[in-house]
Image (cartoon, helix red, strand yellow):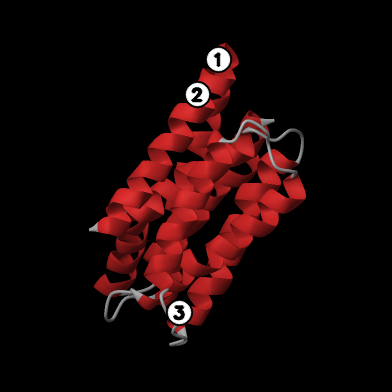
C-alpha cells in the first residue's frame, strides 16, 4: 500500500511541483518553492506536528493511514489560502504549540482514537499550521511555488514518519508510542516556555 502511495501520489507530486516551480520566469518562483520546501523543516513546531500526524496515521488501519495525512494537507492548504489572503488568526502560534502537545498526548495514549476523531482533530490543527505558512510567505515569492514547496515537504515528512513508525513499532508498539508521544509533548511544552 505504501509503495502504491509513493508511485501514485508522492512521485507525481514531486515532478509536478518541481515543474511548476520552474515554469514561472524569475528568481521568485524558484526561491518561493525552495522557501516552501524549507519552511516545515525550519520551524520545530511544524516539523514535530508533521511527524506526529504521520505517527497518528500509522497507528490506524486501512484507508485511514492515507486519509489522515491527506486531510492534514488539504486543510493546511485551506489555512494557507486564508493566510495568503491576509486573514489573521489570533494566538495562532499558541494554537500550533498546543497542537504539538495534544498530538504528543494522542500518540502516547494507550488506546488509539478512532479514524474519524483523529481526522477531525488533525484537520483543525492543519488549518492553524496552514494559516501560519501562508502568512509567512517570503516577499515577492510566487504563492503557487511556495505552497507547492511546503505541501511537498509536509507530505514527505508525514510519509517518512508513517513508514518509520510502522517498521519500528512492530517490536514494541506500547514503548514506541510512549517514547514518541512523550518526546513530542515535552518538545512542544519546551517550545511554549521559550
Q: Position of residue 125 (x, y in %)?
A: 54, 61
Q: Position of residue 60 (x, y in %)?
A: 69, 35
Q: Position of residue 64 (x, y in %)?
A: 73, 42
- Residue 83 is tagged as 3
Residue 83 quadrant: bottom left
Q: Considering the image in quadrants, where does the N terminus appear?
A: top right
Q: Which SS class for mark 3?
A: helix
Between 79 and 121, which is closer to the camera in this rendering?
A: 121
Q: Residue at x 40, y 47 (%)?
A: 48
Query: Crowdedness of circle 1 by 10 Å Cα count: few (<14), some, many (20+)?
Result: few
Task: Kindly indicate whether the residue at mark 3 contacts the one at mark 2 (C-beta within 8 angstroms).
Answer: no
Query: Crowdedness of circle 2 by 10 Å Cα count: few (<14), some, many (20+)?
Result: some
Q: CA distance from mark 1 to mark 3?
A: 41 Å
Between 190 and 138, which is closer to the camera in this rendering?
A: 190
Identify the residue under disc 1.
172
Task: Kindly indicate whether the residue at mark 2 contacts the one at mark 1 (C-beta within 8 angstroms).
Answer: yes
Disc nearer the start of the sequence (1/3): 3
Amino acid at each position: 500500500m505504501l509503495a502504491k502511495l509513493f508511485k501514485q501520489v508522492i512521485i507525481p507530486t514531486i515532478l509536478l511541483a518541481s515543474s511548476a516551480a520552474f515554469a514561472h520566469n524569475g528568481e521568485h518562483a524558484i526561491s518561493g518553492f525552495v522557501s516552501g520546501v524549507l519552511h516545515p523543516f525550519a520551524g520545530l513546531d511544524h516539523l514535530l506536528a508533521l511527524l506526529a500526524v504521520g505517527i497518528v496515521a500509522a497507528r490506524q488501519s486501512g484507508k485511514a493511514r492515507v486519509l489522515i495525512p491527506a486531510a492534514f494537507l488539504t486543510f493546511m492548504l485551506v489555512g494557507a489560502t486564508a493566510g495568503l489572503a491576509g486573514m489573521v488568526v489570533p494566538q495562532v502560534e499558541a494554537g500550533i504549540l498546543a497542537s504539538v502537545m495534544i498530538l504528543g498526548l494522542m500518540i502516547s495514549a494507550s488506546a488509539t482514537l478512532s479514524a474519524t476523531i483523529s481526522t477531525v482533530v488533525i484537520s483543525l490543527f492543519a488549518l492553524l499550521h496552514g494559516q501560519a505558512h501562508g502568512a509567512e510567505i517570503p516577499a515577492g515569492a510566487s504563492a503557487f511555488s511556495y505552497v507547492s514547496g511546503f505541501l511537498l515537504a509536509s507530505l514527505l515528512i508525514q510519509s517518512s514518519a508513517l513508514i518509520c513508525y510502522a517498521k519500528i513499532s512492530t517490536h514494541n508498539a506500547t514503548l514506541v508510542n510512549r517514547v514518541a508521544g512523550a518526546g513530542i509533548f515535552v518538545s512542544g511544552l519546551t517550545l511554549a516556555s521559550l
